[in-house]
Each structure stands twice: as structure tokens, then as C-alpha cells.
Image: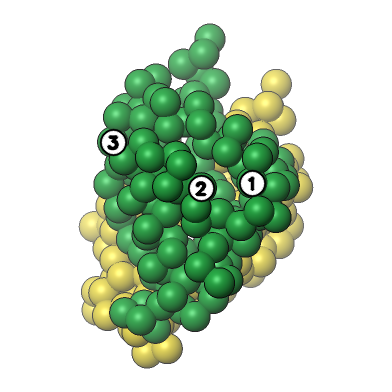
Chain colours: A yellow, B green
Amino acid sequence: MTENSPALQIALAYHEAWTNKDLERAMSYIAEDVVCDAPAGRIEGAEAYRAFMAPFVQILRGATMIAAFGDDETALVMYDTATVPVPSAPAAEYVTAKDGKITYSRFLFDRAPFQAARQ
Amino acid sequence: MTENSPALQIALAYHEAWTNKDLERAMSYIAEDVVCDAPAGRIEGAEAYRAFMAPFVQILRGATMIAAFGDDETALVMYDTATVPVPSAPAAEYVTAKDGKITYSRFLFDRAPFQAARQ
């Protein structure tokens, strides 16, 4: 299903935008009532989601896609990021998309090296 | 590709085995020269991989698949686990499979709640 996955197309367009530090364009793929289950807990609504992503985009140095799959309504991606405090910070996202926007995201990364860098 | 993905079949058989605490059967899907990039670093070889998985299988209470995709040679899965120290510990695995065995795994989970539980 991946070749013609509408959800993956949205997930990749979103990914391409924020990894190029274009948070405005990235947010154009996020539904107003988005729900995101992240390591620190649930984030509800586009405004809270933007506040969650903005600091990460600021410390981002680069990103490399590891794998990307999708079907009609869902997509699953894994990528590595290089950030200012953590040289390799991989993440995975499982998203549900509808009408061109991400409505749900399960977001996974290892908080441990970021916590260690803060200390 | 997911419906007929040989790599996903192996990834799911492996997943089914270890989430049922059958580490012996799980290891039958792991190549002798497996390489696994995990949050704490690279694990090389089946023996080291078994030593990495054994403690986790012991604290496992249950697992729920969130998403699973694959193509000929690779698969990407995300799942949630319930463990003794951490009630919800989601993880993602990107694997390469060959001749019925996993030869490479990129393994991702949040170490922070496990570190917090140890303190």
C-alpha cells in the first residue's frame, strides 16, 4: 500500500517541512484538533502541538529517514535526527491522516540523552 | 507491499514469540551475526542480543501492536508494552530480514521512565 498511501504522502510532506525548519508549512499538515501521544504525555490541539515542536525545530541540525510506510489512513515512519544537544536522536511516528491533515500522532523518542544533556 | 511482506512475517513471528515470553522461539528468528542499534548503543551477535532481550522479557506484562508494515526485505513496527516498572513503554523496530531471520534491527524506546523507576 505504501506506494500510493495518501497518509504517507501527508506524513512525508509534514516531515520534509519541519526538518527544513519550516514550522509554518509543517503546521499546515496538522489538524486543528490533533491529538499526539508523546513520551511526556498527551498533547491536544494544534496550538499545543506547535509549542511542542517549536523548541525541537530550533535545536535541529538535520534528519535522515530510516523507513517510511503507509496505507490509506495511517503511516509509520522512523528517522534519525541530529540535534544540538544530542548528535543522534532517532524517533518514530505513527500517524492517522484525514483530508490532508494529521489528526493523530503517536510520537516516540528516547528522552534519556536529552535529560542527560540538560544536567 | 505489507500484505505479502516476507520481512514483516518474520518481524511479527519474532514479536509474537518474545511477547509471549518465549525467548527461545524468538531467538530462532534472529541471525547469528545480528546487528542491533538500540538506545544504549550497538549490540552485535545473537548471544549479546539474547542478553539484551532476556531482562526485558522478564519484566514484560503484555504488548499491543500499534502499527506494522513491511516490504520484501524490511519491516517497521510500533507497539506498546506494559512492564513491571513502566505501565506503558512503547517501542519501534525497523528490521532487515534475510533467509527467515532478522539480520539488522534499529530499536527505539524511551529509556527515561525506566531510569526514573530505578531511582
Q: Earlier in the sequence, mark 2 or mark 1?
A: 2
Per the image, the residue denoted by label 1 is: B46
Q: Is residue A54 visible?
A: no
Tell me the element at label 2.
helix
Q: Quadrant of the N terminus of chain B?
A: bottom left
Tell me the element at label 3.
strand
Could you tell me if the residues under marks 2 and 1 are in contact, i.e. CB atoms within 8 Å?
Answer: yes
Picture coordinates of residue A73 (x, y %)?
Answer: 26, 74
Q: Amino acid at mark 3?
A: Gly
Q: Which mark is residue B62?
A: 3
- Label 2 to label 1: alpha-carbon separation: 8 Å
Per the image, the residue denoted by label 2 is: B27
Q: Looking at the image, which residue is at 24% across and 57% down?
A: A33
Q: Looking at the image, which residue is at 58% across and 71% down?
A: B98
Q: Amino acid at mark 1?
A: Ala
- Label 3 to label 2: alpha-carbon separation: 19 Å
